[in-house]
Image: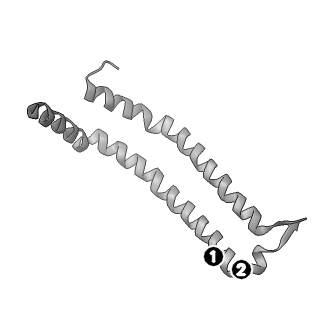
Amino acid sequence: MSDMRDRELTTYRDVQLSPDFSELRRRFRRFVFPMTALFLVWYFVYVLLADYAHGFMSHKVGGNITVALLFGLGQFVTTFAITMIYVRWADRRIDPDAEKLRHQIEGEPQ
């Protein structure tokens, strides 16, 4: 049992150190980190404006709809947009290579 576990760990360690996996991880990080940073900046701008720019955020755009309400709804819209963008991007740029890597590990035909 220990021998089988050691072989499995060696296989996964080999994959982790492989250039294909490194490229996959690099591609993932090049998308996710900047997208996360942009969203966090957008979120903190919203929070800071809500805290320090009461006059601006309480400005009525139409009826009872304020700038703060639009910014708050914009947070939801942004979250869904980022999710849709990521799914489309991952389907094209990550999933095919991840599938090839999985087939290499499991020894299945592609």
Left/right placement of residue 69 relative to residue 92 reads right
Q: How many marks?
A: 2
Where on the picture, by quarter, is residue 47? bottom right
Q: Position of residue 31 (x, y in %)?
A: 47, 51
Q: Tell me if label 1 and label 2 are in contact, CB under 8 Å.
A: yes
- Label 2: few (<14), some or many (≥20) within 10 Å? few
**Quadrant housing the C terminus:** top left
Q: Position of residue 62 (x, y in %)?
A: 89, 64
Q: Is residue 70 above or below residue 53?
A: above
Q: Which residue is mark 2?
A: 53
Element type at mark 1: helix
Q: Which residue is mark 1?
A: 48
Q: Amino acid at mark 2?
A: Ala
Residue found farthest to the left? 3
Return the residue nearer the eye: 54 or 21: 54
Determine the residue positioned at 85% across, 67% down. Answer: 61
